[in-house]
C-alpha cells in the first residue's frame, strides 16, 4: 500500500505546485485542479495521502492541501467509513495537533485554521455521544505547549461559531451539542479563564525581555480572548457575572496591556451589549465602580497614539463599550432596577472626551447615546446630565463646523472628499437632533450660547480663506470666486454655516418648551435687530443671515411694530445680484439667496398668517412693483410670492372678497391661458413643439431667446395655477366659514360642504390644462418624436438629477456655488419638459381635495382625465410614478366616491397598469436569465446604466401600484349573508364597491396584478403583496363561483413565487401562509388543487393524502394550527428554490445520533401510576395533616 500512496502523493504535490504557481499555463492549472478534485472524490486512500501531505516536512502549501483532503473525507465520506477507520483518523488528527506543527510563532495561520476545522468537523459528527471525553482531551492537549493551546482555542471558537452563530448543523445535532456545551459551560469558562490568567501572567513576567517566549504567551492570550468573545455573546449572563464579575474585572485589567487591549475591549463590548432580563443585566453595572472606570479612562488617555491604526481601532471599540454601557444604564434606571451611579459624572466626562475627539467616527458614535440620555425621563432630570447638556452644546459648536482646509489636504481625491462630506452631512444632522434634546434640558443656556455665537460672527471680519485651495477642492476649472467673496470652504462660510445650524436647532425648541412669559424677548429682539442691520453682499453669508432671520422671527410676535423691518430686509434679497445688470447666468449661491428669501416670506405667511395680515397691502404693493419688470424675477420666484399672498388671503374669511382678489391676481394668467393663440398651441403637438422651439436647430445661444420666453410664459401659467390650487382654502373654523359664505350645504351625515374661492377661476382654466397633459403624452409618439430637431433629439431623456434620484445615487454635497450656472439649450429644454409634466399632474392631484365637489362634478370629468392623463403611457418611461401619486390623492378624497367616475377611472387605470407592468417585468426576467454578451466596452457602461434605470423605474412603479392597492383597503362593515340587518366588523378588506357585479372585470384585473406580481424579481414587493393584498382581495370572492382555471392559476402563481422567492425567510413565511389560506378555502370545492399538489417534486403522497382528507373533512382529526402549518410547509418544500450560490454546492450530510435530552412524556394511566403517586397514603387514618 505504501508504494501507491507515495506515488500518488508525488503526483498530488506536482498538481499542487502547478495550481499555485503564478507562471503556470491556464490549461495546465485547470488539468491539475481537475486531477485534484477527482482524487478527492474517487481515490480509495485519501486518508493516508492526506496524512502524508500534511506532514510538517512538506511545504506550507502542500500541507494545507493535505489537510483539505482530510477535511473533505470527514465531510463527505464519514458516514460510510468503518468505525476503526474513524478511530484511526481521529487518533492521527490528535497526533497532528500534538506533534505535527511548528512552534506558535513559526506556524502559518492557515495551517492552524485547517487543523481546527478538521477537529471541529469530527466533533460535529461524534460529540458528545461517541466522543464523551473530548473536552478533557482538549484540556490535556494544552499541556503540550503554546501551539497546542492556541489550536484548542481555535477549535472551541470554531465549534461555537458553527453551532451557534452560523448553525451549519441539522437541528437535532445542533441541539445536542449546544445543550452539552451549556451543561459544561462552568468548566469551559473556568478552563478559559485559567488559560488566560496563566499566559497573561507569563507574558507580563517576560514582556520586559521582549523575548519570543513572551510573544508566544501573548499570542495564546489573544487566541483565548477571541474564543471568549465567541462564547460571551450567547452564554447565560450568569457565566459572565459569576464570582463577582471576575471576567469583567480581568477584561478591564487587560485594557492596560497594549498587545491585548483590543481583544479585551472586543470581549467587553460584547458582554456590555448583552440583552436579557433587566435583573440579570444589573451586575454589568459594576463597570461604573471607581476601579473599573479608572482602567477604562486610563486606557483612553494617550491621545497622541490615536493616529496609529491599531490604537485608533482600539479607541473605536472602547467608545462603543462606553456607548453600550450608557444603553444599559438607560434601560436599568428607567425600570428602577438600579439608582443613578454616584460617579456618573466621571463616566460622562469620559464620554464627552470621545465627543470632542478629532475623529468624526468617534464623535458620531457617541451621538445616539447622548440622545438617549437627554431624552431619558429619569436621567434627563439629573443635575449631572443637565451640566453635561451645556458642555455638549459647547462641544457642538466645534463639531458642527465643516472639515477644515488642513483636513481636506488629506483627501485630495475628489471621490474620497465627496464621501467625507456626505458623511459629515449625516453627522451634522445627527448632532442637530441631539442638540435639540439638550436644549430641552437647558433652554436658556442654549439660547445664550447661540446668541453669543451669532454676535461673534456678526462682529468678526469676513475671512475668505485660501482662494487657490478653494478652487482646487471646488474641482472646476471655470470656478472662480468673486473678489472678496467666500466659497463653501472659506473659514467664514464654514463658521456661519455651523452657527446657523446650531441656531435653528436651539430656537426650534426654545419657543416650544419655554412659556411665553419666560421667553428672553429683549435679548431675542436685540439679536434680530443685529441680524436686520447686518449688511452683507456675500451670497453664502447672506443665505445664513436669512436663515437666522427666520429662526428669530417668532420674537417679532411680541414686537409687532418690528414686522415691516423684517420684510424690508427680505425684499432686497429676492432680487439679489452680486453684480447688478450682469448678463451672465447667476451662480447657485445667488439663486439660493433669492429662493431663500421667497421661502422665508411663504413660511411667515403660512405659520403666522393672522399676524402678517396687517401688512398685506404693503406686501401686495411690493409684489406688483416686482412683477412690473417681467425679467426681474424667475417664474418660480413670481409664483412663490403669489403663494404668499394667497396664504394671507385665506385670512380674509370672506368668500366674495377672497374670490375677487384671486381673480385679480390671476387675471394676467387667465387672459394669456385662454387666448386663442395659446389654445392652438396647447391642443396640437406640432404647434406646441414649434412654439417652444423644440423643432429648431440651435447653433447660437441667442437664437433661442424668443422660444425661451415662450417656455417661461407657459411655465408661469402652470406654476400660478398650481400655487393657487395648493394654497387657497376655506377657514378651518366652521363658524367662521359659515359667516364668510364658504359653506354651501351639508351631507346626509351632517358634515359641512365647503366651496373654495379659487374654484370658479381655476375650473375655467382646466380644459386647456388637460389638453396640455394630453399633448405632452402625445409627444412620445413616434411621429412627434420625429419632429424634434437634432439639437433636442434627447429632450425627453431622463435628466441626470432625476436619474441619480431614481438610482439612489447621492448628489455631490459640495457644488460649484461660486460658478455661473451655464446650461446648454438641451438641458434647458429637458428642465422645461420635466417641470411642466410634474406640475400639470400636481395640479390634478391638488384639485381633488382643494375643489372637492366643484371638481368631481365637472361634466364628463372621467372621460377627460382618461383621455388626457392616461393615454400613450406605454411610450413614456416616467409616466407611471407621477400618475399613481395623483390618483392615490384622488381616490382618498371623500367626495370622489361617485360610481360612474370611479368605474371609468378604476377600469382604465388598472387595466393599463396590468399590461404595462407585465410587459416590463417579462423584459427584466428575460434580461436576468440571459447570459452576458460580448458587447463593445465603450457602449457597455451606458447600456448597463440604462438597464439599471429601467429596472429601477419598474420596481418603483410596482411598489407604487401596490401602495395604491393597499390604499383601496379600508376598514368597512360587511353585511352578513344570512341577515341584512346584522353587521359584523372584519379585518381590513378592499373597498366593497370593487366587489360589486358591475366591476367584476376590474376586480379580476386587481387579482391578476397582485398574483402576477408575486413572481416578479422583487422580494420586498412579493412579501408585502402576499401579506397585505392577495388574500384581502381573494377572500371577497372565494365563496363565489370561480372558474377552475382561475383557481388553478391563483394557486400555481403562489407556488411559482415560492420557487423564485422561497429562499428568503420573510417571503417564504408569507407565501406559505397565503398558499395555505387558498388551499383551505378552495380545496373542498376544487379538486384541481390536489392535482397541483401531486406535481410538487419530492412530495410524500401518504402525508399529502392525510392532509388533504383533513382539509376536505375537518372533523376527521383536530390538529393545532401551528402543527398544521408546519405540515403544509413540509409538503410544499419541493417548490422552494435555492439561491444561485447553493444550487451547485455539494451537500454535507451529518447523521443524527441518539438524542441525549429526550423529554419524558408523563403517563396518562392514572391507575398504573397510583402507587407511585401515593394517592392511597393520602387517605390513611394516620396520615399527617
Image: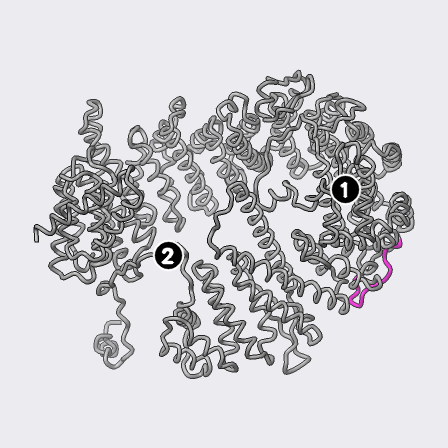
Between residue 758 and residue 979, name the one nearer to us: 758
Write down the residue under mark 2: 1142
Q: CA distance from mark 2 to mark 1?
A: 58 Å
Q: Quadrant of the N terminus?
A: bottom left
Write down the residue under mark 1: 606
Q: Residue 117: percent from the left, percent from the top?
A: 24, 48
Looking at the image, tell me whether mark 2 or mark 1 is earlier in sequence order. 1
Q: Residues within 10 Å of mark 2 (few under 14, many from 20)?
A: few
Q: Is residue 177 left or right of residue 559?
A: left
Magenta span: predominant SS is loop
Q: Residue at x 52, y 63 (%)?
A: 1015
Q: Secondary structure at mark 1?
A: helix
Look at the image and tell me whether residue 1027 can be seen.
no
Residue at the left extreme, as displayed: 2
Give, as a single range, the part of the protein colored magenta: 741-751
Q: Would you say residue 746 sits in the magenta stretch?
A: yes
Colouring used for the render: one colour
Amino acid at each position: 500500500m505504501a508504494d501507491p500512496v507515495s506515488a500518488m502523493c508525488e503526483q498530488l504535490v506536482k498538481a499542487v505546485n502547478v495550481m499555485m504557481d503564478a507562471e503556470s499555463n491556464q490549461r495546465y492549472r485547470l488539468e491539475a485542479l481537475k486531477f485534484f478534485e477527482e482524487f478527492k472524490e474517487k481515490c480509495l486512500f485519501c486518508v493516508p495521502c492526506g496524512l502524508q501531505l500534511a506532514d510538517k516536512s512538506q511545504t506550507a502549501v502542500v500541507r494545507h492541501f493535505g489537510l483539505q483532503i482530510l477535511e473533505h473525507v470527514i465531510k463527505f465520506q464519514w458516514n460510510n467509513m468503518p468505525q476503526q477507520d474513524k478511530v484511526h483518523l481521529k487518533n492521527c488528527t490528535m497526533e497532528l495537533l500534538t506533534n505535527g506543527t511548528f512552534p506558535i510563532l513559526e506556524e502559518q495561520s492557515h495551517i492552524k485554521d485547517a487543523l481546527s476545522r478538521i477537529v471541529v468537523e469530527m466533533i460535529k459528527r461524534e460529540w458528545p455521544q461517541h466522543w464523551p471525553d473530548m473536552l478533557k482531551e482538549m484540556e490535556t492537549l494544552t499541556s503540550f505547549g503554546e501551539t497546542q493551546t492556541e489550536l484548542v482555542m481555535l477549535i472551541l471558537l470554531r465549534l461555537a461559531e458553527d453551532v451557534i452563530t452560523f448553525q451549519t448543523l441539522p437541528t437535532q445535532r445542533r441541539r445536542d451539542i449546544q445543550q452539552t456545551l451549556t451543561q459544561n459551560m462552568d468548566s469551559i469558562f473556568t478552563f478559559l479563564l485559567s488559560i488566560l490568567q496563566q499566559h497573561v501572567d507569563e507574558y507580563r513576567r517576560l514582556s520586559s525581555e521582549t523575548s519570543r517566549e513572551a510573544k508566544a504567551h501573548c499570542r495564546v492570550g489573544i487566541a483565548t480572548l477571541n474564543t471568549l468573545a465567541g462564547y460571551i455573546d450567547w452564554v447565560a449572563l450568569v457565566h459572565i457575572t459569576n464570582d463577582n464579575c471576575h471576567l469583567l474585572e480581568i477584561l478591564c485589567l487587560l485594557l492596560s496591556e497594549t498587545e491585548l487591549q483590543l481583544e479585551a475591549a472586543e470581549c467587553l463590548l460584547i458582554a456590555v451589549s448583552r440583552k436579557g432580563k433587566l435583573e440579570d443585566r444589573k451586575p454589568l453595572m459594576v463597570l461604573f465602580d471607581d476601579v473599573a472606570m479608572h482602567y477604562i479612562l486610563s486606557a483612553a488617555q494617550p491621545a497622541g497614539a490615536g493616529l496609529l491604526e491599531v490604537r485608533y481601532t482600539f479607541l473605536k471599540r472602547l467608545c462603543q463599550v462606553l456607548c453600550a454601557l450608557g444603553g444599559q444604564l438607560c434601560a436599568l434606571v428607567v425600570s428602577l432596577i438600579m439608582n443613578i451611579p454616584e460617579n456618573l459624572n466621571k463616566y460622562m466626562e469620559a464620554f464627552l472626551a470621545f465627543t470632542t475627539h478629532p475623529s468624526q467616527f468617534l464623535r458620531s458614535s457617541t451621538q445616539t447615546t447622548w440622545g438617549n440620555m437627554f431624552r431619558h425621563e429619569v436621567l434627563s432630570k439629573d443635575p449631572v446630565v443637565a451640566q453635561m447638556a451645556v458642555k455638549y452644546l459647547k462641544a457642538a459648536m466645534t463639531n458642527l463646523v465643516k472639515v477644515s482646509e488642513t483636513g481636506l489636504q488629506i483627501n485630495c481625491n475628489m471621490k474620497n472628499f465627496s464621501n467625507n462630506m456626505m458623511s459629515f452631512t449625516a453627522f451634522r444632522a445627527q448632532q442637530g437632533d441631539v442638540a435639540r434634546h439638550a436644549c430641552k434640558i437647558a433652554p436658556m443656556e442654549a439660547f445664550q450660547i447661540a446668541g453669543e455665537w451669532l454676535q461673534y460672527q456678526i462682529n468678526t471680519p469676513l475671512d475668505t480663506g485660501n482662494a487657490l485651495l478653494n478652487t482646487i477642492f471646488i474641482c472646476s476649472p471655470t470656478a472662480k470666486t468673486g473678489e472678496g467673496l467666500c466659497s463653501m470652504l472659506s473659514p467664514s462660510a464654514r463658521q456661519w454655516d455651523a452657527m446657523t445650524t446650531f441656531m435653528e436647532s436651539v430656537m426650534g425648541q426654545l419657543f416650544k418648551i419655554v412659556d411665553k412669559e419666560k421667553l428672553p424677548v429683549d435679548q431675542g429682539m436685540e439679536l434680530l435687530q443685529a441680524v436686520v442691520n447686518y449688511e452683507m453682499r456675500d451670497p453664502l453669508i447672506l443665505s445664513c443671515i436669512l436663515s437666522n432671520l427666520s429662526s428669530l422671527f417668532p420674537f417679532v410676535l411680541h414686537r409687532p411694530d418690528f414686522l415691516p423691518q423684517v420684510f424690508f430686509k427680505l425684499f432686497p434679497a429676492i432680487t439679489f445680484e452680486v453684480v447688478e445688470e450682469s448678463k451672465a447666468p447667476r451662480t447657485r449661491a445667488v439663486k439660493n439667496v433669492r429662493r431663500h428669501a421667497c421661502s422665508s416670506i411663504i413660511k411667515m405667511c403660512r405659520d403666522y398668517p393672522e399676524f402678517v395680515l396687517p401688512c398685506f397691502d404693503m406686501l401686495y404693493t411690493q409684489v406688483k412693483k416686482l412683477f412690473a419688470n417681467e425679467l426681474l424675477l424667475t417664474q418660480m420666484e413670481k409664483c412663490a410670492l403669489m403663494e404668499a399672498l394667497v396664504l394671507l388671503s385665506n385670512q380674509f374669511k370672506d368668500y366674495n372678497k377672497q374670490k375677487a382678489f384671486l381673480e385679480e391676481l390671476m387675471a394676467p394668467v387667465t387672459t394669456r391661458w385662454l387666448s386663442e393663440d395659446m389654445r392652438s398651441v396647447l391642443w396640437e403637438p406640432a404647434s406646441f413643439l414649434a412654439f417652444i422651439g423644440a423643432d429648431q436647430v440651435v447653433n447660437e445661444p441667442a437664437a433661442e431667446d424668443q422660444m425661451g420666453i415662450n417656455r417661461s410664459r407657459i411655465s408661469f401659467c402652470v406654476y400660478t395655477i398650481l400655487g393657487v390650487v395648493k394654497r387657497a382654502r376655506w377657514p378651518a373654523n366652521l363658524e367662521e366659514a359659515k359667516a364668510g359664505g364658504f359653506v354651501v350645504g351639508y351631507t346626509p351625515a351632517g358634515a359641512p360642504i365647503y366651496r373654495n374661492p379659487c374654484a370658479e377661476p381655476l375650473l375655467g382654466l382646466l380644459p386647456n390644462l388637460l389638453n396640455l397633459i394630453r399633448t405632452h403624452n402625445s409627444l412620445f409618439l413616434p411621429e412627434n418624436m420625429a419632429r424634434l430637431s437634432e439639437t433636442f433629439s434627447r429632450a425627453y431623456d431622463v435628466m441626470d438629477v432625476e436619474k441619480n434620484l431614481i438610482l439612489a445615487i447621492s448628489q455631490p454635497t459640495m457644488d460649484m456655488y461660486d460658478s455661473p450656472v451655464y446650461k446648454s439649450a438641451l438641458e434647458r429644454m429637458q428642465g422645461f419638459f420635466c417641470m411642466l409634466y410634474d406640475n400639470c399632474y400636481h395640479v390634478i392631484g391638488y384639485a381633488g381635495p382643494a375643489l372637492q365637489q366643484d371638481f368631481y362634478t365637472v361634466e364628463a370629468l372621467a372621460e377627460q382625465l382618461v383621455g388626457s392623463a392616461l393615454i400613450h403611457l406605454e411610450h413614456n418611461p416616467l409616466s407611471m410614478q407621477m400618475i399613481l401619486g395623483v390618483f392615490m390623492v384622488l381616490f382618498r378624497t371623500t367626495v370622489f366616491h361617485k360610481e360612474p367616475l370611479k368605474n371609468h377611472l378604476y377600469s382604465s387605470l388598472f387595466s393599463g397598469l396590468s399590461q404595462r407592468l407585465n410587459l416590463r417585468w417579462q423584459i427584466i426576467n428575460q434580461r436576468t436569465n440571459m447570459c452576458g454578451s460580448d458587447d463593445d466596452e465603450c457602449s457597455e457602461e451606458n447600456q448597463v446604466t440604462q438597464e439599471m434605470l429601467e429596472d429601477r423605474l419598474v420596481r418603483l412603479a410596482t411598489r407604487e401600484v401596490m401602495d395604491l392597492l393597499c390604499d383601496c383597503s379600508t376598514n368597512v362593515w360587511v353585511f352578513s349573508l344570512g341577515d341584512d340587518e346584522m353587521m359584523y366588523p372584519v379585518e381590513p378588506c378592499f373597498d366593497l364597491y370593487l366587489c360589486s357585479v358591475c366591476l367584476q372585470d376590474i376586480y379580476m384585473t386587481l387579482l391578476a396584478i397582485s398574483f402576477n406580481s408575486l413572481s416578479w424579481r422583487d422580494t420586498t414587493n412579493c412579501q408585502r403583496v402576499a401579506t397585505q393584498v392577495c388574500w384581502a382581495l381573494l377572500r371577497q370572492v372565494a365563496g363565489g363561483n370561480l372558474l377552475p382555471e382561475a383557481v388553478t392559476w391563483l394557486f400555481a402563481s403562489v407556488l411559482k413565487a415560492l420557487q423564485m422567492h422561497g429562499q428568503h425567510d420573510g417571503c417564504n413565511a408569507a407565501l406559505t401562509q397565503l398558499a395555505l389560506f387558498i388551499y383551505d378555502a378552495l380545496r373542498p370545492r376544487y379538486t384541481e388543487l390536489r392535482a397541483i399538489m401531486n406535481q410538487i417534486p419530492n412530495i410524500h403522497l401518504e402525508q399529502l393524502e392525510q392532509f388533504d382528507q383533513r382539509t376536505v373533512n375537518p372533523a376527521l382529526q383536530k390538529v393545532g394550527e401551528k402543527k398544521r402549518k408546519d405540515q403544509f410547509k413540509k409538503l410544499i418544500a419541493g417548490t422552494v428554490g435555492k439561491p444561485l450560490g447553493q444550487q451547485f454546492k455539494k451537500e454535507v450530510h451529518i447523521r443524527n445520533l441518539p438524542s441525549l435530552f429526550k423529554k419524558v412524556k408523563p403517563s396518562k394511566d392514572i391507575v398504573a401510576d397510583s402507587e407511585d403517586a401515593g394517592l392511597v397514603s393520602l387517605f390513611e387514618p394516620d396520615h399527617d395533616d
